[in-house]
Image (cartoon, rainbow, N blue to C red):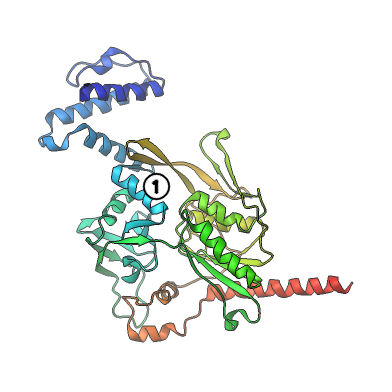
Amino acid sequence: MRSHRHLLVTFVTGILIGLGVPLCLEFFRLPNAEAQQPAQGDDAYQHTLLFTRVLEQVRQDYFDESKVGYKELIYAALKGMLSSLDPHTQFLDEEAFREMQQETKGEFSGLGMVIDTKDGFITIVTTLEGTPGFRAGLLPGDRILKINDKSTDRMSQAVALKLLHGQRGEKVTLGIYRPSEAPAGRTNNPLMFEVELVRETIKVNTVKEARFLPPEIAGDEHIAYIRLEQFGENTAGELDRALSTLEQSGVRGVVLDLRNNPGGLLDSAVEVAGRFLPHNQLVVSTQGRNADSRREYRAKTLKSTGNYVMAVLVNGYSASGAEIVAGALQDLKRAVIVGETSFGKGSVQSVLDLGNGIGMRLTTARYYTPNNRIIHEVGVIPDVIVPVSESDERKLIELRSPTPALVSPEEKQQLKDFHDNCLERAVTALRGMLIYGDRNHAAKAAL
């Protein structure tokens, strides 16, 4: 059986060959041996040699022998290397890789929160309905300062996710900072607070509230409302079933709500956009480092799109896949975009299976809309801008919860008078389009 040192040599040799580095026997001397100096400018050789020497020095002299196994040290090095590139690139050990696969299939164990790194803080992008985080009243924009007494200061997103996920039934205590001031008259929602949650098995149904809007909002028009919570493996199928029911009932307009949608699977977002576009229409393209690395993602549906007008709702927490859908439908004049400028997360993370149950999530490209617009750090700017206050954002989320934890009885009464201005503006736009279309149709018929 080969020794660990022999395996390490084989590992580093593969790295060097892949980099096109000429090999020499001096490379494989022990760390305390005097190594031959590499040729000037031979950076790959020099720095890989440095890594190996430090690795062996740690194994030889670090006081706690239980922490210096090759696997532990190599995994730690890979995590540090990848997390230094950007918040979305990460090494996935066995546990993280398994959890990632479960999440995309629509079921995992955790608290039901989607997080990202924003302005240097671990920030909640959204909480999935019916989950512990949602029931506790946690909101998009809340910053997680502590997880079980561990400070998140300088903590990577990957480490935070690992601490949030875990075994069902385990308790997790979060220290939360809510940046803006509490709404007037609110006394039970401090700027900083702690909340104890219990992990559950999270089952994600991504299509929510597929229904016709009531006459007091939509008038006599058959305008439907569909909300997508995120993009998973089952989203396109769920959406198909919802649209089929609505189309059979004579839908004339659709409001697609992507507010607080953090994204998900690229293929799923392309499939969703494709439901409203002609077959083979370009939805999004990705461009990496090389000029010839462009990839195009096109609508694959063979079913003709419904003959109805559309509006898409977005806000500052609509990210990634949500921005792909909104950007495509906006560029192709298929929908009017209503709300606030989206999050601006337009980079592509490719998940690479490294074998033996481990993987790597690597940022490899940026998204471009059909009109070649960049999404990353820019976002999708709505056609109809509707500013929404932090207070109204909270009320909208609280309305979706049957038992919001941080809402007093007085506030529940106030919620009854709440108006979703973004939705109402979208419906107004669609009604105007329908009236204009009907008049045009009548004028042509009269000729």
Which of the 4 image quadrants contains residue 37? top left
Tell me residue 293's x, y (percent).
Answer: 55, 36
Q: Does residue 172 appear left or right of residue 224 in this picture?
A: left
Whether 223 is drawn above or below 152: the answer is below
Say whether residue 137 is visible: no
- Circle 1 sits on which residue? 88
Whether 165 is drawn above or below 33: the answer is below
Q: Does residue 443 appear left or right of residue 418 in this picture?
A: right
Say whether residue 207 is visible: yes
Image quarter (top left, top right, bottom left or bottom right) of the C terminus: bottom right
Q: How many marks?
A: 1
User: At 51% across and 61% down in the image, what residue appears?
Assistant: 238
Whether 155 is drawn above or below 229: the answer is above
Of 134 and 33, nearer the camera is: 134
Tell me residue 6's x, y (percent).
Answer: 24, 21
Of 417 and 109, nearer the camera is: 109
Which of the 4 image quadrants contains residue 317? bottom left
Image quarter (top left, top right, bottom left or bottom right) of the N terminus: top left
Q: Amino acid at mark 1?
A: His
User: At 25% across and 63% down in the image, what residue appears?
Assistant: 174
Tell me residue 431's x, y (percent).
Answer: 66, 75
User: At 69% across and 65% down in the image, what residue appears?
Assistant: 307
Q: Mark 1 Cα within 10 Å, few/some/many (few <14, many 20+)?
A: many
